[in-house]
Image (cartoon, helix red, strand yellow):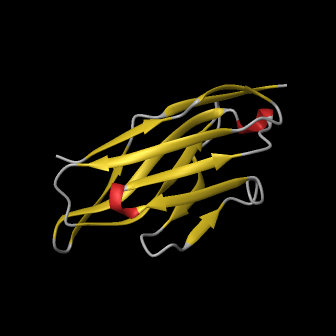
Amino acid sequence: QVQLVESGGGLVQAGGSLRLSCAASGSMFGIDDMGWYRQAPGKQRELVASITTGGSTNYADSVKGRFTISRDNAKNTRYLQMNSLKPEDTAVYYCYADIATEPSTWMRYWGTGTSVTVSS
């Protein structure tokens, strides 16, 4: 059974930094895209950043230049370094991963979410 384990959220002052991590475990044939969405109170969930196993990255315009996503393929882990945090970054951050548990059987898995609160 595939699981995504998240860590690294918390409370930080504006201008500060946090690093999120997301580790995939279980029986996996392959992993492709991994990343984070976030959802702030009263708002829709939005893509924050993603990275493929090959290293291609994608960022929301609102976080470009401040957030960096990276990967450790050997550990099936992705990291989101968040710098220069702003109060508007406050949200629950959800890790996701596109994983195949057998050839040609891909599914998107989700973590349970980690809260990030940025105080002004």
Q: In which quadrant of the rendered view does residue 97 lie?
A: bottom left
Q: Is residue 109 above or below residue 72?
A: above
The residue drawn where x is 83% and y is 36% is: 15
The residue drawn where x is 37% and y is 45% is: 110
The residue drawn where x is 57% and y is 31% is: 9
Q: Is residue 30 left or right of residue 96?
A: left
Q: Is residue 85 left or right of residue 74?
A: right
Q: Please state which of residues 81 and 119 is positioned toward the viewer in this rendering.
A: 81
Q: In which quadrant of the rendered view does residue 11 lie?
A: top right
Quadrant containing the C terminus in the rendered view: top right
Q: Is residue 99 above or below residue 23?
A: below
Measuring from the top left, give residue 75's x and y in whole percent. 35, 55
The residue drawn where x is 54% and y is 74% is: 56
Measuring from the top left, give residue 67's x and y in whole percent. 69, 53
Q: Is residue 95 left or right of residue 115?
A: left
The residue positioned farthest toward the front in the image shown = 74
Measuring from the top left, give residue 10's x and y in whole percent. 61, 26
Q: Is residue 48 above or below residue 21?
A: below
Q: Is residue 119 left or right of residue 68?
A: right
Tag count in the figure? 0
